[in-house]
Amino acid sequence: MTATIIDGKELSKTKRSELAKEVEQIKAKGLLPKLVVILVGDNPASLSYIRGKQKAAEEIGVGFKLENYPESFSEKELLEVIEHYNNNDEYHGILVQLPLPAHINETAVVEKISPLKDVDGFHPVNIGRMMTGQDTFLPCTPAGIVEMIKSVGVDMVGKNVVVVVGRSNIVGKPVGQLLLNEHATVTYCHSKTKDLSSFTKEADILVAAVGRANFIKGEDIKPGAVVIDVGVNRLESGKLCGDVVFDEAKEVASFLTPVPGGVGPMTITMLAHNTVQSAKQFLVE
Ligand code: NDP
C-alpha cells in the first residue's frame, strides 16, 4: 500500500480562498476584520511562526498588527496591553505568541484575553465550550487536524481506536476531545504509557504529537491507518522532520500528512478562520 498524502498546503489554499470571500462580505458590511499578535522577546521560531500568520491574514484580506515588546516587559505591562485590545473593537482577534519569558505567568496571560477574541482557543472558557460540544473558537492545530481527516472523506464515527500520542493542553488533549466529538473512540498515550506500540498498532487513526524525530516507525502503524504527524523537529542537518518515519509510514498507512506542508499550514489557516468568525460577532446587522 502507498499512502495518499494529505497536502496541508493545498487544503489551506482552498480554505483561504473561501475565507477571502467571507472577508469581502464582512468588509461590504463596513467592518475590517483585524488580528493583533503580541510577542514578548525575539525568539526566532516565534518570529517565523508570526510571519506565517501575517502572510495568511494578508492573503485573506484581514488586517494584521504585531506588537513586539522587549524580553524585559513585565507581566503587569503585558496584561495592560491585553486589556487595551480587549476593549478596542477595531481588533477582533488577540493572540499572545507562546512561549513567554519565564518571568511571565502564561496562565494569567491566557486567562486575561477576552474569550470573545481568543482566536487561539486556549482560554479555559473556550476549552470548556469545546469539551461540551458548543460553538466556540477551537484550538487551531486540533481543528486543522479534524479538517484534514474530513477532507479525504474518512468517517470518524465508530472508528475502533484513535490513539493520540501526546497529551499537551494545546495539541494532544484537545485533538482527542475533537475526535471524541466526532464519535471516535479515543485512547490517549503519553510518556508513562506502557507498551505504546500495542496501542498504536490498533489505531485506525493515529495522531502523533510527541515532539520526537522519527518516533513512530512503520511497524508501529496498523495497515491502512490514517496517520497525522503533528511533530515539528529540527534535525542536526537543519532539515525539519515529523514524529513519524515518513518513508516507512507511506508504505503502511492509507493517508499520511507530511512534515513540513501538513498540519503546520492548516494550523495557521484555522487561526485565520477563527479571526474571521470572531469579526462576525462584531457585525451590526
Ligand atoms: P509537548 O512537549 O507539550 O507534549 C509532548 C507530549 O508527548 C507529552 O504529552 C508527552 O508525554 C508525550 N511524550 C513525550 N515523550 C514520549 C514518549 N517517549 N512516549 C510517549 N509519549 C511521549 O508538545 P506539544 O504537544 O506542544 O507539541 C508536540 C509536537 O507538535 C512538537 O513537535 C511541536 O513542535 C509540534 N507542534 C506542531 C504544530 C503545528 O502547527 N504543526 C503546533 C503545535 C505543536 P507527558 O505528558 O507524559 O510528558
Image: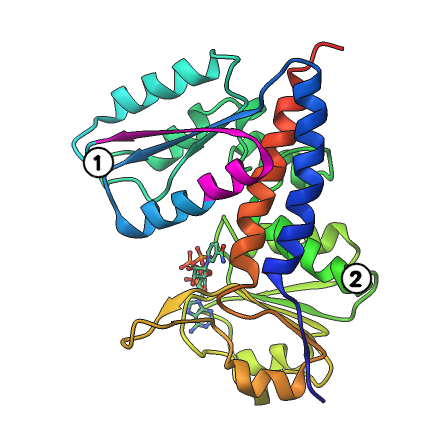
Q: If the image is split into quadrants, where does the C terminus sit?
A: top right
Q: Identify the residue at image location x=51%, y=22%.
A: 114
Q: Which mark is residue 156?
A: 2
Viewer can see residue 58: yes
Q: Identify the residue at image location x=59%, y=83%.
A: 249
Q: Secondary structure at mark 1?
A: loop
Horizontal side, residue 76 vs residue 153: left or right: left
Q: Identify the residue at image location x=47%, y=12%.
A: 88
- Quote the CA–CA distance across marks 1 and 2: 42 Å
Q: Identify the residue at image location x=59%, y=59%.
A: 9
In magenta, the rendered stretch is 53-69
Pinpoint residue 221: horizontal percent, then vertical percent: 62, 82
Viewer can see residue 195: no
Question: Any atom of ligand 1 within 8 Å of the CB at mark 1?
Answer: no
Q: If the image is split into quadrants, where does the N terminus sit?
A: bottom right
Q: How is the image coloured?
A: rainbow
Q: Amino acid at mark 2?
A: Met
Q: Is residue 199 above or below residue 181?
A: below
Badge 1: residue crowd in 10 Å (few <14, some 14–19, many ≥20): few
Q: Which mark is residue 103?
A: 1
Q: Secondary structure at mark 2?
A: loop
